[in-house]
Amino acid sequence: MPRRDYENDPSAPKANSLVPAASVVVADDSGRILLQRRTDNGMWALPGGTMEIGESIAGCGIRETLEETGIDIEITGIVGTYTDPGHVMAYDDGEVRQEFSVCLLGRPLGGQLRTSDESTRVAWFTPAEIDGLPMVPSIRKRVDDWLAGRFPVVR
């Protein structure tokens, strides 16, 4: 389901849903991070998605990372919470979701890189390689917070 992100855009549609979600900065021992190129907007993003009933936010991050990238991880910390009401995502089915994401920090345990129905490419990137990648501003904020060593619990 294609989506369009709006960040503090006065022409953005009004939010009609709020769904808890997790994203994960998965960093390997070399300092590279795992990113996926999304099928719904063509942008590079952290693995992540919506939390399901009966799972923890950490469990959501672990499950989504495995589903979307083929990499099994453990959660080692938190980068921050991102709940800006000025950031909404409009989907083709009429849902307009207000951002509500907890960005976790993870470490790879194993697995093989692979794409999913949500990604066209999955790869590891050094911090220097990340700057030129197209990303929505909310994902860029999370990556920048991690790169700068800033871990804002609330944003």
Image: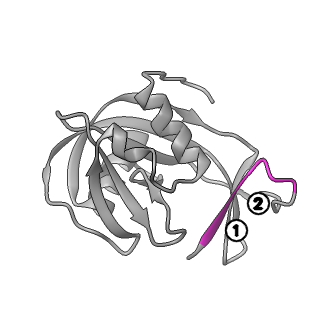
Is 7 included in the stretch rendered in magenta? yes
For label 1, the SS is loop
Residue under label 1, please give it. 95
Q: Nearer the viewer, residue 21 or 142?
A: 142
Q: Which residue is mark 2?
A: 16
Q: Residue 144: x, y in percent?
A: 49, 34
- What segment carries the magenta color? 3-10
Amino acid type at circle 1 is Glu
Compared across the picture, whether 94 is left or right of 146 comes to right
Residue drawn at x 50%, y 56% is 134
Q: Which comes before the other along the chain, label 1 or label 2?
A: 2
Q: Dot 1, crowdedness within 10 Å: few (<14), some or many (≥20)?
A: some
Q: Image height check: is 8 above or below 50? A: above
**Residue at image coords 41%, 70%:** 118
10 to the left or right of 128: right
* Left or right: where 138 falls relative to 42: right
Q: Quadrant of the N terminus?
A: bottom right
